[in-house]
Amino acid sequence: MNMTELLIGAIYFLAAVIGWFLKEALDNIKNTDKELNDFKVHVANEYTQKNDMRDVIKQINERFDRLETKIDRLMEGK
């Protein structure tokens, strides 16, 4: 083997190693992207949005206000 063949072989080997590392990196990126998407779906299904929570709290407060009014009316009648 002459020096040119060794150099070409080394270049091929280096290209293969770089290709393998790039493939692993891309696979990791794809896996992370899938996990992130799965997490987004989980969060959307399991947790409520702020606006929805505000509406529920508003409804609860309105019911407490009505209860307080009824209790006050009952207390005035006694």
Image (cartoon, helix red, strand yellow):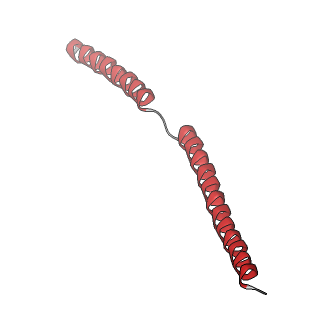
Quadrant of residue 62 within the rendered picture: top left
Residue at the spot 33% in from the left edge and 24% down from the top edge: 61
Q: How many marks?
A: 0
Quadrant of residue 66 within the rendered picture: top left
Residue at the spot 42% in from the left edge and 27% down from the top edge: 51
Locate the N terminus and report the quarter of the image it occupies. Answer: bottom right
Q: Viewer-proximal residue, 58 or 33?
A: 33
In this rendering, position of residue 53 left or right of residue 27: left
Q: Viewer-proximal residue, 75 or 3?
A: 3
Residue 12: x %, y % from top left: 72, 72
In this rendering, position of residue 14 left or right of residue 2: left
Residue sitting farthest toward the bottom? 1
Residue 8: x %, y % from top left: 73, 75
Locate the C terminus and report the quarter of the image it occupies. Answer: top left
Above or below 66: residue 42: below
Residue 28: x %, y % from top left: 62, 60
In this rendering, position of residue 58 left or right of residue 40: left
Q: Viewer-proximal residue, 77 or 10?
A: 10
Residue at the spot 48% in from the left edge and 35% down from the top edge: 48
Residue at the spot 36% in from the left edge and 23% down from the top edge: 58
